[in-house]
Amino acid sequence: MKKDIVVIGAGPAGLSLACSLADSLLELLVVERQDREKLCDPQFDGRDIALTHFSRKILERMDVWSRMPVDETYSIREARVLDGDSPYTLQFDCSDITEGILGYIVSNHLICRALYEKATILDNVELLTEVSVTNVQTDGGGARISLSNGNTVEAALVVSADSRFSEIRRKMGISADMHDFGRVCIVCRMRHERPHEGIAHECFFYGQTLAVLPLADRESSIVITVSSSKANHIMDMTSHEFNRHVQGQYKGKLGRMELSSDKYLYPLVAVWASRFVGQRFALIGDAAVGMHPVTAHGFNLGLRSQHTLARLIIAATQSGADIGSVGLLNHYHSTHRRVARPIYLGTNAIVELFTNDGPLHRLARKAVLRFGNVFPPIRHVITRQLTATGG
Ligand SMILES: Cc1cc2nc3c(=O)[nH]c(=O)nc-3n(C[C@H](O)[C@H](O)[C@H](O)COP(=O)(O)OP(=O)(O)OC[C@H]3O[C@@H](n4cnc5c(N)ncnc54)[C@H](O)[C@@H]3O)c2cc1C
């Protein structure tokens, strides 16, 4: 089989690239090891994804935003950061930005469903499911992709969107820094007595962090980050015990709270690939940069990576240039690196500062929160960075 581009993985990053190249006249093959049923009807997995303004624009351009249910697309009006038991908060509100809201929240499974719906109506995109890519070989002239069904595909470019633990990245000889935080995220939804008023909270308690993200009027997405050794204890709590636990931590701010979904557990490992490209090969999504979810930027960066790559590919096809050229790939690498590096390092620094409970770190946390409030320009820069207003 011959294709222009082979995309490995039909997760949100891989499917986004397929959608971005809808009008490119390039023939794409997307290879996914999961079965089609899981892709076309993904189930709630506990992840409610905070999306930036720029991500919304990308999803709109791809004709994907309108495929997500309006009544399940929520807005964040304000965000507050709390440290320990102190009532002092660092506040980010939309007075700093013209869009009127800080960002959006959409459940991961709804994003995936909408991307699948769009990608599978495109004439230039073929989706192969229940098949894995087992190997990739490239040279100056092209790439050969070996599949688990015994077939081989030839292409001008291979794009790996095969998760932060990407096997193909390793097979292509690209190393990656991996940082295992020794912690896990427990995510779920909870209903509550009082309205959240569109306010998101990130509470850095000692030993545990709690993020509360606004969904419908009296329902929120809950993200608990805790040491892996304590995870089972929380996962094994009955609903009643869990409700009391979260309500107590949140100091009853939302009144009575009640679990409204299952609880889901995700180990926390950050990944930074040493290069985002190889010969006729590019990494996008988590395969390039796998983020700690505290700044809610993983998929936002994934969308950004495929957007950058797709624009370069489209420009190359319009000028009759090679879509797998060294120049194009290096351009992609340097552009995405410039965007992702500060967010990746900033996020890891926040995690280090706010999850280390030593006395010096506690002092530094308080200082950082006050500094942020006292110097509005700093807060403004952070708000613009985190909400990606204007792209
Ligand atoms: C608790 C939690 C909360 C989060 N919150 C946010 C948030 O608020 N905002 C945000 O922007 N991001 C958030 N994220 C991050 C976001 O979920 C990820 O960045 C995103 O899902 C990664 O998408 P991906 O397509 O790169 O990878 P994946 O979703 O991992 O998809 C990879 C795909 O590749 C397939 N695959 C792998 N190997 C092969 C192979 N060899 N052959 C064929 N197929 C293969 C897999 O089956 C899979 O379908 C959060 C993550 C977590 C865990």
Image (tube, rainbow, N blue to C red):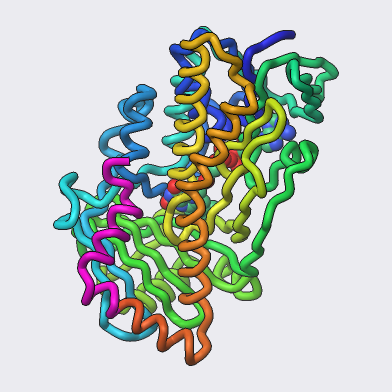
Compare residues 343 and 203 and report the one nearer the observer: 343
Q: Which residues are magenta?
A: 370-391
Q: Position of residue 310 (x, y in %)?
A: 49, 25
Q: Classify residue 195 as left or right of residue 265.
A: left
Quadrant assignment, res 84? bottom left
Q: Is residue 196 visible?
A: no
Compare residues 1 and 115 and report the one nearer the observer: 1
Q: Position of residue 173 (x, y in %)?
A: 78, 41
Q: Residue at x 57, y 48 (%)?
A: 289
Q: Residue at x 41, y 61 (%)?
A: 222
Q: Classify residue 163 as left or right of residue 208.
A: right
Q: Residue at x 35, y 83 (%)?
A: 366
- Of all residues shown, which one is farthest toward the right? 150
Indicate whether 255 appears above or below 148. Answer: below
Q: Position of residue 192 (x, y in %)?
A: 29, 63
Please tell me in which quarter of the rendered image ligand 1 is found: top right
Q: Classify residue 128 as left or right of residue 108.
A: right
